[in-house]
Every structure is written in structure tokens, then in C-alpha cells.
Image (cartoon, grey):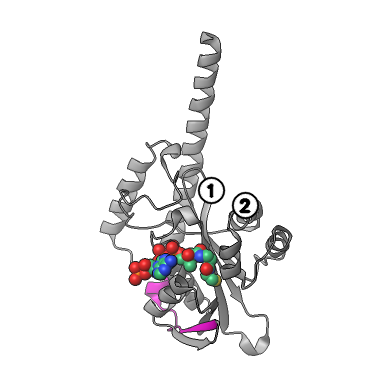
Amino acid sequence: MVTPGTLFKASFDASKAFFRMPAEEFTQRTPVVSYAQPVMVPIRSIGSRHGERIATHLLALDAPDRYLRFGYAANDEQIRRYVDGLNFERDEIFGIYNRRLELIAMAHLAFSSDPELKSCAEFGVSVLAKARGRGYGARLYDRAVMHARNDGIDIMFIHALSENTAMLRIASKAGARIERDGSESEAYLTLPPADLDSRMTEMVEEQLAQTDYRLKVQAKKFWDFLTALQKVGHGVRE
Ligand SMILES: CC(C)(COP(=O)(O)OP(=O)(O)OC[C@H]1O[C@@H](n2cnc3c(N)ncnc32)[C@H](O)[C@@H]1OP(=O)(O)O)[C@@H](O)C(=O)NCCC(=O)NCCS
């Protein structure tokens, strides 16, 4: 449950962060451990307008990551086909953006179209290599669980390679049952029914994430404007 204290701290931390230049962020491939972990990670639901950003995110995954994400070493064309085939009406796509509006982590909650499996949903996730180890994968999983619950889903499952320790760890920590079958594994999480708490929490979190995104858009415009102004200044001096 999101408490008023948590919201206050999240909003305070966010306003501090907007005064930092975006270039300071995520410039290395390995996670920058000196950054304090945010109290709340703004995860927003993504619509079809963000198709190009989704494609850019997935195309940035290297071959081993693509293999872990899709179960095969998807080439660029297969990734583009996957993005073009996303059903934004039926499924839910969640994302985490940095201050440069780069989609650094995303999850796809796919609802079954088979009438006999109406209460099942499949979860798939990817986090850019430079943003790993910060808990984004686990947060996206929790967010998807809450959404699936509120949508009347009973079982959320993941199809993962057995070597995918990070993914299986996220699922098993959340209480999923892991079934290994050689090199492949399935993780099944049985969801409790929705309640007032889960509905309210999802509503508040979504609103916060949308506001966070709008602020990031404004902050980016501001920094872009300032950079352009500096370039003009340099040009005039020269
Ligand atoms: C799987 C993936 C989404 C994890 O994202 P992440 O943001 O780095 O994960 P988190 O930071 O939330 O870490 C989750 C847990 O896994 C552990 N973990 C992370 N990377 C690990 C690794 N390489 N080996 C072992 N454990 C690892 C973390 O320590 C953490 O456990 P803890 O809570 O006990 O500390 C990310 O590695 C990824 O995008 N991989 C490529 C695509 C993929 O495999 N998708 C999943 C298949 S659908």
C-alpha cells in the first residue's frame, strides 16, 4: 500500500532529481551504485503511441538477452514484427523511463485469447543492461501482478530458460511455483482476487507515473532549450 509518507518522500526525491542534468544519468553499462534507490519507481502503462520507443528498447538488447527474452535469438526484423503485432487493446505494456525519456525497462502482460484460458496471463520483461540490478525487473513484476489481479486473472505465468537465474529469482521470491523441464522453466503465480486496496494502489501508482512522465517531458524540453541556447552563445562568441 502506498502511504502518504511514501508519496511525500517520492515527490521530494523526484523534484530534487529534476534539477540534475539528464547526461549525469546511466552513462555506464554497469549500475551506478552511488545513486540512492528511489522510494517508488514510476511505472506507467504504455500505449501504441510509444511503439517506436518499445522497438528502440528491444533492439538495444544484445543477442544473449534477446534469447533470454524471447526464447530464441530474435533478429531486428523479428523484433519489429513483435512490436507491430502488439495488441495494446487486449494486453498491458508497462514501462520505466529515465529523464532522457529513454525506455529503460518494459514488461508485457499478455492476456490469453483462448476462451478456456481466460483467467491466465503471461509475463515477459526486459531491462536495459545499464539499468539492471536496481530492482526494476522485480518492480515491473509486482506491477503486473497487481494489474492482473485487478483484471480478474487467477494465474500469471512466465516461460523462461532455466539458466535465467534473475528472472526465476524474481518469480520465486514473489511466491511463484517453478517447474523445470530441462533447459526450459515455467513459473506459475496464483493470484488472490482484487480488493479495494489493490484497486486503489494501482490507480494512485498509475496517476503518479503519468505525472512523473509529464514532468520528465517538461524537464527534457527545458534542458534541450538550454543546450540549444548555449550552442548559439558559443557560435556568437566564435
Ligand atoms: C531478467 C531481468 C529482467 C532482471 O532485471 P533486473 O532489473 O536486473 O532485476 P532486479 O534488479 O529486479 O533483480 C531481481 C533479482 O535477481 C537477482 N539477479 C539480478 N541479476 C542476476 C544475475 N545475473 N544472476 C543472478 N541473480 C541476479 C537480483 O539480485 C535480485 O535478487 P534479490 O532481490 O534477491 O537481490 C534482466 O536481467 C533482463 O532484462 N534480462 C534479459 C531479458 C530476460 O531475461 N527477460 C526475462 C524473460 S521473460
Q: Using residue 212 as the reference point, say whether residue 88 is left or right of it.
A: right
Q: Earlier in the sequence, mark 1 or mark 2?
A: 2
| Numbered mark located on residue 102 in the image | 1
Q: How crowded is mark 2: few (under 14 residues within 10 Å), some or many (20 or more)?
A: some
The quadrant the C terminus occupies is top right
Q: Which amino acid does label 2 sit on?
A: Thr
Q: Is mark 2 on a helix, strand or loop?
A: helix
Q: Is mark 1 on a helix, strand or loop?
A: loop
Give the Cα separation between the discs numbered 1 and 2. Answer: 9 Å
Q: Give the range drawn in magenta.
A: 184-202
Q: Residue at x 42, y 55 (%)?
A: 208
Q: Can residue 200 be seen in this view?
A: no
Q: Which amino acid does label 1 sit on?
A: Glu
The quadrant the N terminus occupies is bottom left
Q: Residue furthest left?
A: 5
What residue would you read off at disc 2? 56
Q: Position of residue 192 (x, y in %)?
A: 42, 84
**Magenta highlight on residue 218:** no
Q: Can residue 89 be seen in this view?
A: yes
Q: Residue furthest top?
A: 237
Q: Where is residue 128 in the image (x, y as percent from the top left)?
A: 51, 56
Work out whether 9 lies above or below 184: above
Image quadrant of residue 60? bottom right
**Magenta highlight on residue 193:** yes
